[in-house]
Image (cartoon, coloured by chain):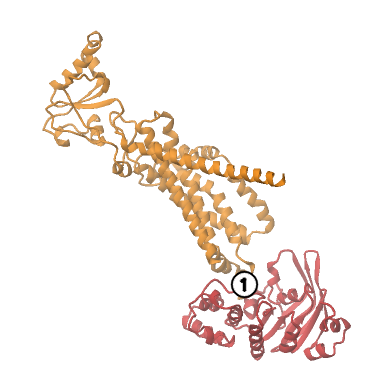
Chain colours: A red, B orange
């Protein structure tokens, strides 16, 4: 089943043509990695799917972005509803200056959940899914800033999971973390695959190879190659992909 | 040579810093020196005395009692702890009604005053000291210094009343606080609303257009605001509330609110804009609406900056003189509502200092008011420091 789809997407920051005619289909319950050098448009493309680029002034989009077959840039789509379905984890851990508990509860509260029992239950589930529960269960009332960077990032993942999205967009989620925290996040991504469709932007090619089912290689705003991860890393069709993966540029 | 120039420049910078600090300290010192003399002074005008009949047991009177007596609100000595005797007030000038001028030359005048006082049992006389003879038969009332409690808790401000002035600053202090709170009640919701609008909601083009205009508001001289208030707001208040006069605390609060708005808006907007984008993205990414994000993330994040903005606005309101002087009616009475004329501390100083003789009790009392105003604004600046300092620790 196709979860996310881009049809002839062109995207502009004012005059800068950031994405050029991108076509891509992402299936349900897969992990897809986007790789490519800095400034190639992979983050921009990722952020199209929960309309985060709307926050930037002077951007323009042509073509279609579909989630579950529906154009999310259609006039009668409510952005906040879309974002409860398509969750996001950012590059730098960005917990709110609140308690651990309130950080995870935030998404539920803003979406109108009032039942404290339900909230507490969802918080435990999400923290367990994010493999953080055992580390924080005794200090849920403590400030989220007391956690380490890796724990903060898993808290942000738990926070995104709490509102039960079906898609999780991850924008270089491990780039600010140490190797141990990184491997924990990677294990987590792997375990989340059963229930979520995950798109991850990464600079780390080993990471892409380890966690993803499919990989897309971006260069200068174009999707050069999109295929099974094994194929991309072992036997890419395009020379540019080959050069990037073997580290000849990037 | 290079080192030498360096040393000279350093010296000049150090010197100007030192001179500035010393001048500021000297001004504060001067303020307190002039003001503190108040409590060593009597409220009875210098060079004058109050005298009663030698048989009168009353030894001293408070300024309030003196005033009541001369206003003929107290008419019997027993009301102030004396015998049951009617009070007869006597002012120095009245001697000229009793005798023709030619009979009052030189020492004869003093003799007549002395006689007049010794012959009436219920008399209280207010006389210039220089007409007293060594053989003066009247009893002089002891004059008390202005006391701290009279000054801070007194409800009457009659600094030029004769024979005894009253220096109760409570109406002025309360007037200042009332007008300031009125200002905050008006300026706070508007200021924060505009700050949030400009920082979060407005199109960048609108922000670029409005921000300089709002900053321009801070540059308009306060007398212009006062004039605007006098011509526009005062009649409007009079009409809307059906008041006998429109010069009220409310008019002052409105004008001050308009004047405090640019400060509040600019500082609060800057504070709101310090909210990191990642924080807002995190909130929006969880399906929060724009308003939910503002209310639950942006405002809590920048609350200390917003508080600092508000305190700065209050500081501006408390110290403001000209505009308030023009629109509040300046009645030094205990304020009971915003719809009555009130008088603030700065307005009092501005209005009265010109007519207070240098070194007089009145003059010193105005300096003491200045000290109190200085302390009020100091407290506010310190709390701004405290609040924004706390924020730095949080980060």
Q: Quadrant of residue A133?
A: bottom right
Q: Is residue B95 left or right of residue A243?
A: left
Q: Is residue B341 visible?
A: no
Q: Viewer-proximal residue, B224 or A225? A: A225
Instruction: In the displayed orientation, state which residue is furthest to the right.
Output: A239
- Residue at mark 1: B284
Which chain is indicated by disc 1?
B
Q: What kind of element bears circle 1?
A: helix
Residue located 29% across and 44% down the image: B149
* The N terminus of chain A - image quarter: bottom right
* Residue B195 picture location, percent across and down: 58, 57
Q: Is residue B232 left or right of residue B204?
A: left
* Residue A57 picture location, percent across and down: 71, 64
Is the residue B130 above or below the residue A3 in the image?
above
Q: Viewer-proximal residue, B133 or A198? A: B133
Q: Is residue A67 left or right of residue B139?
A: right
* Residue B346 picture location, percent across and down: 44, 40
* Residue A93 picture location, percent across and down: 62, 75
- Estimate how packed mark 1 is, as few (under 14), some (14 to 19) or many (20 or more) residues with alpha carbons within 10 Å: many
Q: Viewer-proximal residue, A99 or B42? A: B42
* The C terminus of chain A - image quarter: bottom right
Is the residue B289 above or below the residue A233 in the image?
above
Q: Viewer-proximal residue, A18 or A207? A: A207
């Amino acid at each position: 089943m196709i979860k996310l789809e881009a049809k002839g997407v062109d995207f502009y920051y004012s005059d800068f043509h950031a994405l050029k005619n991108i076509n891509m289909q992402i299936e349900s319950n897969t992990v897809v990695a986007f790789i490519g050098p800095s400034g190639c448009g992979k983050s921009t493309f990722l952020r199209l799917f929960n309309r985060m680029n709307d926050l930037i002034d002077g951007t323009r989009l042509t073509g279609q972005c579909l989630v579950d077959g529906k154009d999310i840039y259609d006039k009668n789509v409510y952005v906040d509803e879309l974002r409860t379905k398509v969750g996001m984890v950012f590059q730098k851990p960005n917990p709110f200056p609140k308690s651990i508990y309130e950080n995870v509860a935030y998404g539920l509260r803003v979406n109108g959940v009032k039942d404290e029992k339900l909230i507490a239950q969802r918080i435990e589930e999400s923290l367990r899914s994010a493999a953080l529960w055992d580390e924080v269960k005794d200090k849920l009332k403590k400030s989220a800033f007391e956690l380490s960077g890796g724990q903060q990032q898993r808290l942000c993942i738990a926070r995104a999971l709490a509102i039960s999205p079906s898609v999780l967009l991850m924008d270089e989620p491990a780039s600010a973390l140490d190797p141990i925290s990184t491997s924990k996040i990677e294990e987590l991504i792997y375990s989340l695959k059963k229930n979520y469709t995950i798109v991850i932007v990464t600079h780390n090619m080993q990471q892409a190879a380890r966690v993803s089912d499919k990989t897309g290689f971006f260069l200068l705003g174009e999707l050069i190659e999109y295929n099974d991860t094994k194929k991309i890393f072992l036997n890419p069709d395009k020379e540019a992909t080959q050069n990037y993966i073997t580290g000849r540029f990037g | 040579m290079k080192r030498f120039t360096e040393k000279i420049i350093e010296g000049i910078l150090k010197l100007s810093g030192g001179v500035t600090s010393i001048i500021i300290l000297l001004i504060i010192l001067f303020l307190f020196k002039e003001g503190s003399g108040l409590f060593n002074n009597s409220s009875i005008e210098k060079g004058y005395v109050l005298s009663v009949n030698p048989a009168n047991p009353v030894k001293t009177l408070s300024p309030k009692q003196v005033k009541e007596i001369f206003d003929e609100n107290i008419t019997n000595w027993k009301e102030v702890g004396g015998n049951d005797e009617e009070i007869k007030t006597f002012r120095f000038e009245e001697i000229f009604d009793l005798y023709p001028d030619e009979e009052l030359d030189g020492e004869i005048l003093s003799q007549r005053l002395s006689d007049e006082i010794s012959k009436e049992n219920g008399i209280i006389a207010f006389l210039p000291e220089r007409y007293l003879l060594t053989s003066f038969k009247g009893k002089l009332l002891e004059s008390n210094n202005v006391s701290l409690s009279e000054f801070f808790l007194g409800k009457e401000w009659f600094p030029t009343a004769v024979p005894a002035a009253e220096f109760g600053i409570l109406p002025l202090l309360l007037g200042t606080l009332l007008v300031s709170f009125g200002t905050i009640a008006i300026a706070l919701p508007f200021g924060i609303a505009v700050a949030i609008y400009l920082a979060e909601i407005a199109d960048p083009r609108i922000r670029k257009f409005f921000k300089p205009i709002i900053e321009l508001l801070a540059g308009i001289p306060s007398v212009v605001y006062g004039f605007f208030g006098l011509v526009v707001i005062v009649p409007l208040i009079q009409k809307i509330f059906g008041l006998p006069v429109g010069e009220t605390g409310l008019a002052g609060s409105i004008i001050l609110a308009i004047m405090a708005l640019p400060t509040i808006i600019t500082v609060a907007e800057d504070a709101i804009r310090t909210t990191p984008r990642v924080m807002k993205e995190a909130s929006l990414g969880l399906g929060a609406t724009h308003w939910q994000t503002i209310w639950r993330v942006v405002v809590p994040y920048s609350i200390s900056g917003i508080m600092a903005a508000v305190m700065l606005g209050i500081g501006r309101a408390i110290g403001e003189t000209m505009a308030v002087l023009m629109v509040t009616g300046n009645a030094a009475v205990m304020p009971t509502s915003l719809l009555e004329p009130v008088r603030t501390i700065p307005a009092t100083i501005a209005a009265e200092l010109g007519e207070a003789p240098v070194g007089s009790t009145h003059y010193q009392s105005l300096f003491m008011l200045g000290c109190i105003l200085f302390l009020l604004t100091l407290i506010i600046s310190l709390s701004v420091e405290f609040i924004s300092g706390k924020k730095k620790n949080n980060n």
